[in-house]
Amino acid sequence: MINISQLVRKSKQHPLTDRLIEFVEPEFYLAENVADYRANRSIITPPWFKRIPSSAANNYAFIVFYNVGIKAIFEDGELIENYVEVHDNSRTSAICWPGLGDDYPCKKSYPQTLADGELDLKDWVYQLIVRHIYEKELSFVVSVTKNKFSTPRIKKDSLVNKISSLFPELEPQPQY
């Protein structure tokens, strides 16, 4: 996973105010795919300067996925309302999707998005943001942006290469 917060803190291209905000806000990660998330979710921790007991940055991070499928989970023919299966061509993972009144609620519960026709039982989304609780290694859906396509896009470049290109290394200036 790519730590976007760390890239912003190190970048000279971002204003100082943006870089300072990244010292107090929760960490923001970009997962290349579901396999990347599953492999790294247990090892991500807040940086030392965010380990203040009263700070939200000490408790959780945000993780962004692009181009993933969301599938309903059924048990004995009944829809499990608070969990969805997030998948792509690499792996699958069950992620909690709480409704209003639950811990870490999303604006709309999963059954509500189904009832409103915003998602189908098996659907692809352009962007999924989850709140990852460090201590429990559990993630909760924060927001979903619906994909305009019915099938996933095939990526030509790796996500790491695309993000790295946004933060070019500056060449040293010659000294006279």
Image (cartoon, grey):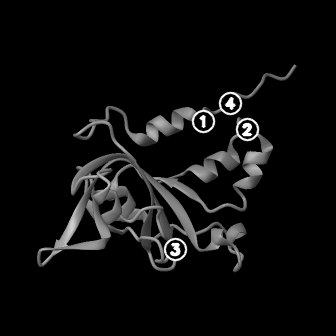
Residue 148 vertical placement versus 95 (above, below): above
Residue 161, image quadrant: top left
Q: Which dot marks residue 134?
A: 3
- Residue at the disc numbered 4: 170
| Label 4, label 3: how far apart the Cα atoms are | 34 Å
- Expressed as whole percent of the image width and height from the top left, the position of residue 37 reads 39, 60
| Label 1, label 3: how far apart the Cα atoms are | 27 Å
Amino acid at pointer 3:
Tyr
> Residue, x 49% and y 65% (percent of image)?
131
Residue 80, image quadrant: bottom left
Amino acid at pointer 4:
Leu
N-terminal of the pair, mark 4 or mark 2, is 2
- Residue at the disc numbered 1: 167
Amino acid at pointer 1:
Phe
Q: Residue furthest right?
A: 176
- Expressed as whole percent of the image width and height from the top left, the position of residue 65 reads 41, 51
| Label 1, label 2: how far apart the Cα atoms are | 9 Å
> Residue, x 46% and y 35% (percent of image)?
162
> Residue, x 56% and y 69% (percent of image)?
60
How crowded pointer 2 is (Cα within 10 Å; few <14, some 14-19, many 20+) is rated as few
Q: Circles 1 and 3: CB distance less than 8 Å?
A: no
Q: Which dot marks residue 140?
A: none
| Label 4, label 2: how far apart the Cα atoms are | 9 Å
| Label 1, label 4: how far apart the Cα atoms are | 9 Å
- Label count reads 4
Residue 171 vertical placement versus 112 (above, below): above
N-terminal of the pair, mark 2 or mark 3, is 2
Marks 4 and 3: which is nearer the front?
3
- Expressed as whole percent of the image width and height from the top left, the position of residue 44 reads 51, 67
Residue 152, image quadrant: top left
Q: Circles 4 and 2: CB distance less than 8 Å?
A: yes
N-terminal of the pair, mark 1 or mark 2, is 2
